[in-house]
Amino acid sequence: MAQKSRIEWTESTWNPVTGCSKISPGCKNCYAERMALRLRAMGNQNYSNGFDVTLHRHVLEYPLRWKQPQTIFVNSMSDLFHREVPDSFIFDVFDIMNRASQHRFQVLTKRSDRLCQLNPELTWAENIWMGVSVENSDYRYRIDHLRNTRAAIKFLSIEPLLGPIPELCLDGIGWVIVGGESGPKARSMDPGWVTEIRDQCIAQNVPFFFKQWGGVNKKKTGRLLEDKTWDQMPGELIGI
């Protein structure tokens, strides 16, 4: 079976690649790095290299065996477009996603420049959602890279939100996720930054998903925004 996920906006995870490296402020307190090192200490063979980028060819065909349709977050423990992942392996992952048409795949990257470069060579079935992480205004260029892809559903993961993002152009974007940083040394998130993005989504009719306030104890801070849970998904019109 796929690995069931506690991430609020997906159902399962599939990690043909594990490990990554830091490229922007959102990476500073990476949850995947903490988890990878913990799993290595527990003796999990998939994490024997810790958080070094590692390809796992033995799991490539797993989604073809999972008959129950599900929403799958691809590489929750890595970035598929990391420079250490060969083009050929990225093509193999896309081949599996195209063949496993019973599932919905969610791919997320901070390396939008490489995504943009490979886009013409990738086959984008409708079940492949493509997203980019944008933690503050300095990285909104990733949205433009995403817009240039041929993915049927394009989404933004604005988590951890580390600063305001005014004048957010959502042309061609089908979904926006916002969340605060969680875990040790979590950086704070101003509620005004969240409501500003929420209001921009409403104005542009883009589904909005508020994942969490975050903090050291994310269960305690919860995920209510102005006394409401925001769980909009692509294809749903947004409204208060």
Image (tube, rainbow, N blue to C red):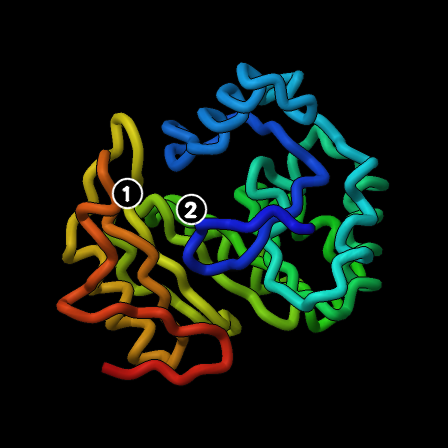
Position of 83 relative to 153 (above/below): above
Please, what is the three-letter code of the amino acid marked with disc 1? Leu
Q: Quadrant of the C terminus?
A: bottom left
Residue 191: image quadrant is bottom left
Numbered circle sitting on residue 185: none
| Mark 2 / mark 1, whichever is N-terminal | 2
Q: Position of residue 47 (x, y in %)?
A: 63, 23
Numbered circle sitting on residue 139: 2
Q: Is residue 163 left or right of residue 117?
A: left
Position of 77 relative to 13 (above/below): above
**C-alpha span from label 2 to label 1:** 11 Å
Residue 182: image quadrant is top left
Residue 63: image quadrant is bottom right
Which secondary structure, mark 1? loop
Which secondary structure, mark 2? helix
Q: Which residue is mark 1?
A: 162
What's the residue at 66%, 41% (across, down)? 15
What's the residue at 69%, 51% (across, down)? 1
Q: Position of residue 65 (x, y in %)?
A: 81, 56
- Labels 2, 1: front one: 1
Nearer the observer, 113 or 229: 229
